[in-house]
């Protein structure tokens, strides 16, 4: 009954005209961001975050959540129609979606993506609604050692999911942690790495860094490597959007399987929507009786990853809201938003700010429904956006990044620093140092350090506090295992490799 | 790319040593537990250790193909120069005008758009920035000679 009452409260908040407007703006903007290659959800939210200083936090969060799951819908359009993923989470959709488009079934591919995303999104909201409060209740038992262990686990999991060069992931994480230590130490009051510059005493604001590292860096990267593809000039009629019975039968269980995989991967810190769609595609291919059809226009190859990425984008809110730990770069940016509005997400959020939490959750039903309608009836205008020259898009990114960085402290120094981080982000990407670990470590750095120091203070300097408390021991074991994964993988590959024979 | 990778590894190594050096000047332990230098020192050690691994891997690498500078890198450099000029113009022209000019200039320099389109976009952008950010969102953007 509590659940229904909370949901009712949520709908009374989400269904106000102002919040419907923000939800509509969010999903619409998310859809556009998804369509435009080179701009992702974290960039869009990072650039808009400083503009919401004066907006009600619930409305702002509803808008940002709309952008987040709207991006997953929007990225599909470019994946299907031009074989260029608008978003990394829709890479797998290109494989079969584009092939379907070449066969004249672009409408069906877009439809199944929208329907699958809607089913997965709505289903995930229902599970999130029951799961997140339970997780929050469980997290009330967490002390400093558990929070430190949880952060360590999140960093460790990055090496599992983050890419092929784990050592560079660790370096990126350490640089993020380092950036988080800059400024006055809150315990001793001593300045750290400020080098006598008064602007650095308060630390480097998160918004300044993400506007640079996501926004401006993205400009340089996109100029250098433009993502071009040929738009399929196929006139799409409304009836082309309808699925045949065979297509529906083939995709219905793929949607369910994709949703389940997406939901669980999205909840894992560092799991993310890209990993979810990738795993869902692989699972579907493995499960299929005709795996050879995948890559040639199998509708399940669109349904599964599309359902998974949307389910993951919704379930990613569970660790953010219940634990205060972001699971992806986008939720990390949102965590920065929470901090900006003076709200601390975590177990107590469900008790102290029920209107915000349940308003946000209820808005997801509305947002997913709006996106379904948009994706069935508004595909042509979104495709038209692809014709916008990048030089204009680039101008908008620089404007938002500059104003965003300036508005944090009304200081030009921050704008220059933002540009510096833009160059850093560009160089890091070129040298294959991933950005995501840096951002997650930056956001969680203060929490990790404070928890570590509190825990060690409580234990009188003994590390045993991390291993004698079961929850923190569990998290730390997972973290250690995660860090060891690359070594295990390497050892496994070495064992599998046939021994070289020397012919004489 | 091999050389760029190596230089990148060396820069990270130097950063690591610098972090260790500067964190050494901070108290490692305090009266009640870890001090302000505790985590930074371990971060520094971590960066040094990882950088050494990266450098060794690069030195062992046989494939030295790939280039850091690509055909379109100069376009990126042009964008960077335009951004720097824009930021330098902030005190003189103010945020709105400088950023508006940036949009027009980048359209002309990088997109080879017609002068008339660039000029029109510049004017529209200046007005839009002023009304959206300074007026509607009440962000006190620095003004320049024309008071915008």
Image (spheres, coloured by chain):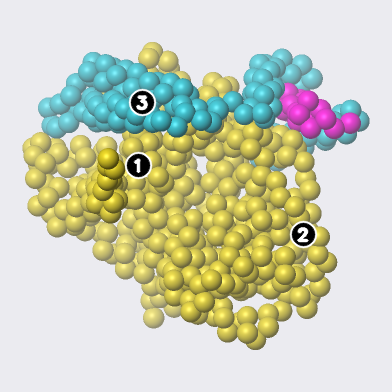
Residue on which the image places disc 2: A232
A80 sits left or right of A153 in the view:
right
Q: Nearer the viewer, residue A323 or A151?
A: A151
The residue indicated by pointer 3 is: B59
Chain letter of the residue beneath label 3 in the structure image: B
Shade representing chain B: cyan
Q: SS for tag 2?
A: loop
On the image, the x and y values in percent for residue A483 come to: 26, 46
Magenta span contains residue A331: no
Q: Residue at x 77, y 45 (%)?
A: A388
Residue A366's x, y, as percent?
59, 69
Report the chain holding disc 1: A
Q: CA distance from mark 2 to mark 1?
A: 38 Å
In the picture, the disc for residue A166 is 1
Q: Which residues are magenta?
A: B96-114
Of callouts 2 and 1, the N-terminal one: 1
Tag count in the figure? 3
The residue positioned 73% from the left and 39% from the top of the image is A390
């Amino acid at each position: 009954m509590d659940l229904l009452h909370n949901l009712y409260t949520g709908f009374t908040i989400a269904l106000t005209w102002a919040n419907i407007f923000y939800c509509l703006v969010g999903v619409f903007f998310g859809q556009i961001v998804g369509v435009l290659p080179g701009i992702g959800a974290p960039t869009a939210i990072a650039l808009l975050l400083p503009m919401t200083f004066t907006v009600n936090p619930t409305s702002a969060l509803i808008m940002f959540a709309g952008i987040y799951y709207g991006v997953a819908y929007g990225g599909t359009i470019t994946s299907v129609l031009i074989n260029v993923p608008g978003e990394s989470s829709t890479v797998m959709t290109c494989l079969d979606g584009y092939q379907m488009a070449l066969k004249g079934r672009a409408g069906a591919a877009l439809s199944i993506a929208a329907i699958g995303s809607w089913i997965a999104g709505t289903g995930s909201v229902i599970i999130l609604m029951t799961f997140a409060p339970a997780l929050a209740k469980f997290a009330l038992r967490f002390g400093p050692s558990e929070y430190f262990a949880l952060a360590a686990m999140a960093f460790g999991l990055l090496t599992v999911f983050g890419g092929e060069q784990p050592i560079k992931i660790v370096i990126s994480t350490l640089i993020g942690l380092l950036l988080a230590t800059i400024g006055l130490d809150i315990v001793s009051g001593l300045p750290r790495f400020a080098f006598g510059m008064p602007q650095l005493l308060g630390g480097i604001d998160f918004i300044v860094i993400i506007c640079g590292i996501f926004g401006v860096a993205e400009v340089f990267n996109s100029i250098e490597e433009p993502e071009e593809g040929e738009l399929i000039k196929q006139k799409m009629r409304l009836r082309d959007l309808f699925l045949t019975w065979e297509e529906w039968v083939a995709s219905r269980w793929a949607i369910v399987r994709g949703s389940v995989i997406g939901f669980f991967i999205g909840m894992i810190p560092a799991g993310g929507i890209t990993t979810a769609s990738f795993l869902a595609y692989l699972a579907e291919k493995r499960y299929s009786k005709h795996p050879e059809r995948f890559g040639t226009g199998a509708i399940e190859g669109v349904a599964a990853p599309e359902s998974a990425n949307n389910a993951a984008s919704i379930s990613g809110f569970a660790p953010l809201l219940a634990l205060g730990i972001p699971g992806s770069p986008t939720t990390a940016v949102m965590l920065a938003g929470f901090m900006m509005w003076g709200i601390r997400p975590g177990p107590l959020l469900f008790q102290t700010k029920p209107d915000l939490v349940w308003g946000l959750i209820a808005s997801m039903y509305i947002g997913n429904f709006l996106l379904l309608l948009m994706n069935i009836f508004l595909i042509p205008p979104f495709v038209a956006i692809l014709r916008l020259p990048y030089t204009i898009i680039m101008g908008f990114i620089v404007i938002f990044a500059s104003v965003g960085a300036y508005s944090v402290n009304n200081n030009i120094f921050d704008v220059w620093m933002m540009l510096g981080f833009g160059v850093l982000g560009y160089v890091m990407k070129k040298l294959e140092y991933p950005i995501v670990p840096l951002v997650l470590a930056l956001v969680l750095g203060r929490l990790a350090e404070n928890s570590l120091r509190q825990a060690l203070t409580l234990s009188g300097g003994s590390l045993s506090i991390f291993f004698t408390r079961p929850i923190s021991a569990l998290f730390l074991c997972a973290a250690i295992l995660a860090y060891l994964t690359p070594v295990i993988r390497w050892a496994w590959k070495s064992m599998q490799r046939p021994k070289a024979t020397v012919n004489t | 790319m091999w050389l760029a990778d190596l230089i990148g590894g060396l820069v990270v190594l130097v950063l690591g040593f610098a972090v260790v050096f500067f964190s050494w000047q901070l108290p490692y332990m305090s009266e009640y537990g870890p001090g302000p230098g505790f985590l930074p020192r371990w971060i520094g050690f971590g960066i040094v250790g990882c950088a050494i691994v990266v450098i060794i891997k690069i030195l062992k690498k046989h494939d030295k193909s790939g280039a850091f500078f690509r055909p379109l890198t100069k376009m990126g450099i042009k964008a960077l120069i335009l951004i720097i000029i824009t930021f330098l113009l902030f005190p003189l022209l103010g945020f709105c005008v400088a950023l508006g000019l940036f949009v027009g200039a980048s359209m002309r320099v990088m997109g080879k758009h017609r002068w008339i389109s660039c000029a029109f976009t510049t004017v529209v952008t200046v007005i839009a920035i002023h009304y959206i950010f300074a007026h509607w969102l009440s962000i006190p953007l620095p003004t320049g000679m024309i008071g915008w």
